[in-house]
Amino acid sequence: MEINECALTFRKYLPFWDKLEDSDKSLLCDNSSLLKYPKGTNVHGGSGECTGAVLVKSGCLRTYIMSETGKEVTLYRLYPGDLCMLSASCVLKAITFDVFVDAEDDSECYVIGGRVLAEITDRNIYAENFALQVAVERFSDVMWVMQQILFMSFDRRLAIFLWDEISKTGQNTVHLTHEQIAKYMGSAREVVSRMLKYFAAEGVTENTRGGVTVLDKEKLRALAMG
């Protein structure tokens, strides 16, 4: 791997980069790999292993938890410039639960060696502060998901999900099946289908082949706002 290519990317996305000694910059690049993940590939498989910190260069990753019965709940998505620290349990010792990370689109990521990153954060306060800031932001994302599951009605949760999807893509159609939406939301396909039938009756959405099209954004937004 070209050190210059690595340094260029890290300087762009890691705020503490210019606060590192040259030796630590070289150490970080020497222990980082630029990997390509085709859509659907598992990047981090849970089980408490320390994959390392994953910096998204292109594409999109989905981070989720899974129950013993295989039910998934999406915690958050990662886009170019985002860093996943939950896959680096050797950096953040307080991580005691398993998370999974999949490539939602064809993605290219730098996987930073967890133990080297841990060494650098131990001796560089700027790197440590950044790691903690990222962890806090991700924790906030997780708490938002838990708040939805515990305290929000399903129609509002589904409206929020659809709103987030069309906001992300800039399209009116969410190209996900009812089963995929249920998987991402940690629900059952029958529940999703029943609620989308209600949305369709209200003129909010319509079911299309392999997707859901939003017909009335204002109504959807009102449902999402509660």
Image (tube, helix red, strand yellow):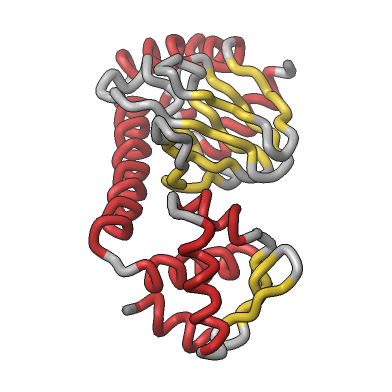
Quarter holding residue 152: bottom left
Q: At 53% from the left edge and 33% from the top edge, which residue is drawn?
A: 101
Relative to the observer, which residue lies in front, 22 or 132?
Answer: 132
Relative to the observer, which residue lies in front, 203 or 131?
Answer: 203
Quarter holding residue 124: top left
Residue 164 horizontal side relative to residue 130, left or right: right
Quadrant where the C terminus is found in the figure: bottom left
Q: At 60% from the left edge and 61% from the top edge, which residue is drawn?
A: 178
Q: Position of residue 82 (x, y in %)?
A: 51, 42
Relative to the observer, which residue lies in front, 114 or 222?
Answer: 222
Q: Position of residue 214 (x, y in %)?
A: 61, 79
Quadrant where the N terminus is found in the figure: top right
Q: At 51% from the left edge and 89% from the top edge, which residue is drawn?
A: 202
Q: At 60% from the left edge and 53% from the top edge, which residue is drawn?
A: 180
Compared with 213, 76 (above or below) is above
Compared with 157, 99 (above or below) is above
Compared with 20, 75 (above or below) is below
Q: Position of residue 148 (x, y in %)?
A: 31, 60
